[in-house]
Amino acid sequence: MDIVSFAKKCMKKLAYNNRLALLPGASAPAIISCAIETKQEVDLALERAKEFGGAVPAEPAVDPSFGGYIGYVSDPEGHLWELVCPAPK
């Protein structure tokens, strides 16, 4: 299986709130994922991203498959960032 097919298969497993996780587009061949300590910091980062030209395509949500809180932002160059607050242990 090639890497693109593998990535799409993995991303389909990350569906939450009845919507699929975002897939990279032609201008963003990868997703950059960052672990963030709190849900509030994820929300703040998404809010602040707009101030710097970022776009937030959807509201952040809890991923029921692992309980983490996830939000996405595209930077001005089109790179897709995934901001994740892991589920509490």
Image: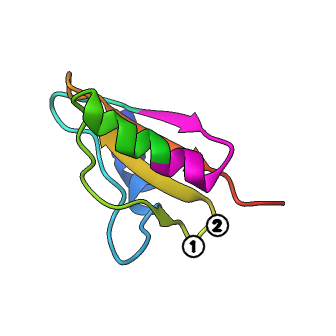
Q: Residue at x 42, y 59 (%)?
A: 60
Q: Is residue 39 visible?
A: yes
Above or below, 45 against 76 in this view is: below
The magenta segment: 32-43
Marks 1 and 2 in Cβ contact (< 8 Å): yes
**Residue 64, numbered label:** 1
Residue at image position (35%, 49%) is: 8
* Magenta region includes residue 35: yes
* Side (left or right) of 71 relative to 73: right
In this picture, residue 32 sits left or right of residue 85: left
Say left or right for 46 vs 78: right
Residue 83 horizontal/vertical position (percent): 49, 43
Residue 56 placement (x, y as % from top left): 27, 48
Residue at the limit of the structure toward the left, as seen here = 26
The amino acid marked with disc number 2 is Gly
Which residue is pictured at 59% across the width and 69% down the height?
65
SS assignment at label 1: loop
Q: Label 1 sits on what residue type?
A: Pro
Residue 2 visible from this viewpoint: no
**Residue found farthest to the bottom:** 18
Location of the C terminus (image quadrant): bottom right
Residue situated in front as seen by the camera: 2 or 83: 83
C-alpha separation, residue under disc 1 versus residue under disc 2 = 5 Å
Q: Position of residue 53 (x, y in %)?
A: 21, 29
Report the quarter where the N terminus lies: top left
Q: Residues within 10 Å of mark 1 (few under 14, many from 20)?
A: few
Which numbered circle lies on residue 67? 2
Count every numbered label the image shows and give the total: 2
